[in-house]
Image: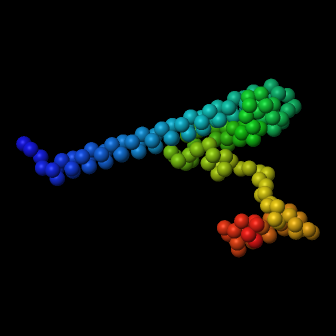
Amino acid sequence: MEITKKEYIQLQELWYQSLIDDCEAIITETVFTSRWILIEGYHSLGKRILIESEKFGDLTISDIATHVAKDVGKSKRTIQRAIQFARRYPDLDELPGGKNISWHKICNNLLPTGTHKVAVPSYIRYLDGLDRKQKIEMYSKLHKEFRGLKPDEL
């Protein structure tokens, strides 16, 4: 039995769409797997440091993070976030976000920063007499009014 040209094209389209669907699934799973391995690694790092923290005596977690960061070649902030992550989510099954989770999202959305500072651009610093909070408020107002303009265009 011979197939028509139209049937042949339809078979090719089905085959190609199946290929594309499979490729997209492979990419999604690979990206998730790589992100998840990184998350598990930072979680293990934080847990390991917490387990050993008593052996550091009177040192604070911040001091411990400083020493560990220096000796393993990571930033103190990364080590602190790993510790904070392990404390906040002792069980990774409780971690929200599904397959769309990443270390970046954990750090920026799920872990409180505590001392987050807003950078004040240099074009705001000329406002003598204003304290940092007032300058930040002024910057926010300017940003809303002149969204998209560069500082030298103001």
The x and y percentages for residue 104 are 63, 46
User: Which image quadrant for residue 55?
Assistant: top right
Residue 70 visible in this rendered orientation of the protein: yes
Residue under the image location 9 percent in, 44 percent down: 2
Q: Give the quadrant of residue 132.
A: bottom right
Q: Is residue 93 left or right of residue 24?
A: right
Considering the image in quadrants, where does the C terminus appear? bottom right
Furthest-left residue in view? 1
The quarter of the picture where residue 18 lies is: top left
Q: Measuring from the top left, give residue 133's x and y in whole percent.
A: 84, 64
Instruction: Work out whether residue 84 can be spotted.
Output: no
Taking the spot 21% from the left edge, 50% from the top edge, the residue there is 9
The residue lying at 71 percent from left, 50 percent from top is 112
- x 65%, y 35%: residue: 42
- Looking at the image, is 72 positioned above or below residue 23? above
Q: Position of residue 77 (x, y in %)?
A: 75, 41
The reply, left or right, for residue 18 in relation to residue 64 is left
